Amino acid sequence: MPARESALSTHVLRPAHLALTFLTTFPLPHVREVKDGDFARASGFYPLAGWAVGGLAALLLWLPLPAPPGVHAALALSGWLAATGLLHFDGLVDCADAVFTMKAPERRQAILKDVHVGAFGLATGALTVLTFWSLLSAAHPLDALTAAVLARAVLLLPMNLFPPISEGSLGGQARAGAGGAPWLALLLTAPLLLPLPWPHLLAALAAALVASLLTARFCASRLGGGINGDVYGACITLAEIAALLALQWGR
């Protein structure tokens, strides 16, 4: 029994806890110890963080408030960004500043580490918020949940197709490798199959996957062949937008 409990803690409880505390700002107990392989195992639970973030956004969209759709969308977007601590949005902004500048790949990598926001990041961030808000204004609450979960599930593909800029970084440690994380991500995403029509779900999945892969491919080409945690954040944000757009086109 102790060995089974240890395996359960190693492969399920601790990685799930780490994924939620790393990708969300929900008040959970602090992770006391991170062991080798924990971040890689936690990547399989990224959709679980999507359920938490998307669930909050869906709840805020559903609330029967006497307000126009734009107000509901603003409230849902605020909750969405707050629940992630702006982690993915910040990654998108940092990537925009780095990959759109006309510099050598080494210089772009240095810009990626800079905490200051430039014109490219500011413009990209503003357009992203405006697009997100517009889509949420016309979205069904289930759309928000679906987009959040799918974006984090499909991230595992570019994470493992493109090498990390730095093996020792958190992004490098989070790669799932050949383990069971991709299958676990699919399992955590499976409940979305029940309420959504197949064509809508497949369109959202395809849109999220294409957006994530294209984002990673473009960033890798501009950063010397590798990607990092900021690129992961950009992949998630743009995949969420793509999934929302696909779900609304399907209606």
Image (cartoon, grey):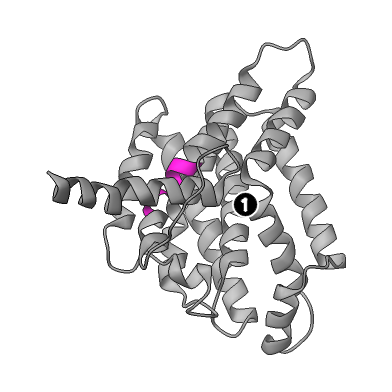
Q: Compared with residue 18, is residue 226 higher up or lower down, i.e. above or below?
A: below
Q: At label 1, which amino acid type do we have?
A: Thr
Query: Does the magenta portion include 164?
Result: no
Residue 170: % across, % down:
52, 68
Q: Compared with residue 172, is residue 17 higher up or lower down, i.e. above or below?
A: above
Q: Compared with residue 164, is residue 153 higher up or lower down, i.e. above or below?
A: above
Q: Magenta-highlighted stretch: main secondary structure?
A: helix
Q: Quadrant of the C terminus?
A: top right
Q: Is residue 49 visible?
A: yes
Mark 1 Cα within 10 Å, few/some/many (few <14, many 20+)? Answer: many
Residue 33: % across, % down:
43, 58
Q: Is residue 203 visible?
A: no
Residue 175: % across, % down:
41, 67
Task: Identify the residue shown where x is 65% and y is 23%.
Answer: 61
Residue 29: % across, % down:
50, 41
Q: Secondary structure at mark 1?
A: helix
What residue is disc 1 on?
237
Q: Quadrant of the N terminus?
A: top left
Task: Identify the residue shown where x is 58% and y is 29%.
Answer: 56
Identify the residue at the far left of this view: 1
- State which quadrant residue 13 falls in: top left
Considering depth in this image, is 149 or 21 the residue closer to the camera?
Answer: 21
Q: Which residues are magenta?
A: 44-49
Considering depth in this image, is 201 or 61 the residue closer to the camera?
Answer: 61
Q: Compared with residue 98, is residue 2 higher up or lower down, i.e. above or below?
A: above
